[in-house]
Image (tube, rainbow, N blue to C red):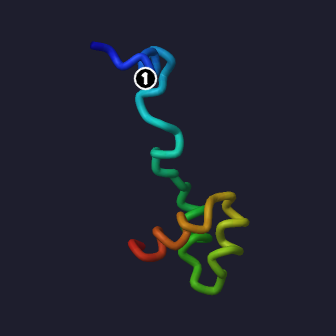
Amino acid sequence: MTDELFSGFSDAGWDEAPWDAEPTFSPDEMQILLNPELSVAEAADRVGCAHHDVVRIRKTG
């Protein structure tokens, strides 16, 4: 039995949902994200990412 709701996604390149993919950052962007002098909001705005990405990177960085 096939699940018609999800059929065709891999044919269209939807092997993974875009919101499930982890963002990647350049070394310059990482310097901005890890800069403790910047607030989470300011770092996210400068790089153009979500606030939760900055928090996650600062916790693991």
Q: Residue at x 66, y 71 (%)?
A: 43
Residue 55 in sight: yes
Q: Is residue 58 above or below residue 11?
A: below
Query: Which quadrant does the C terminus fall into?
Result: bottom left
Toward the front, the furthest residue is 1
Question: Which residue: 46% across, 45% down?
Answer: 20
Taking the image as shown, residue 45 lies to the left or right of residue 9, namely right
Q: Is residue 18 above or below residue 15?
A: below
In the rendered image of this protein, does residue 38 appear above or below residue 19? Answer: below
Question: Callout 1 environment at 10 Å: few (<14), some (14 to 19), or many (20+)?
Answer: few
Residue in view at x 50 percent, y 17 percent: 12
Total number of numbered labels? 1
Percent x, y of residue 54: 55, 69
Vertical order, 59 against 24 (above or below) = below
Residue at 55% across, 55% down: 26
Q: Position of residue 22 (x, y in %)?
A: 46, 50
Which quarter shows the N terminus? top left
Horizontal arrangement in the rendering, residue 19 relative to residue 61 (left or right): right
Could you tell me which secondary element the residue under label 1 belongs to? loop
- Which three-letter amino acid code belongs to the residue tagged 1? Phe
Pick the front one: 21 or 1: 1
- Evaluate whether residue 10 shows in this view: no
Q: Residue furthest bottom?
A: 37
* Residue bearing the label numbered 1: 6
Residue 49: which quarter of the image?
bottom right
Residue 6 percent across, percent down from the top left: 43, 23
Give the left or right position of residue 21, taking residue 42 as reference. Answer: left
Q: Position of residue 8 (x, y in %)?
A: 45, 15
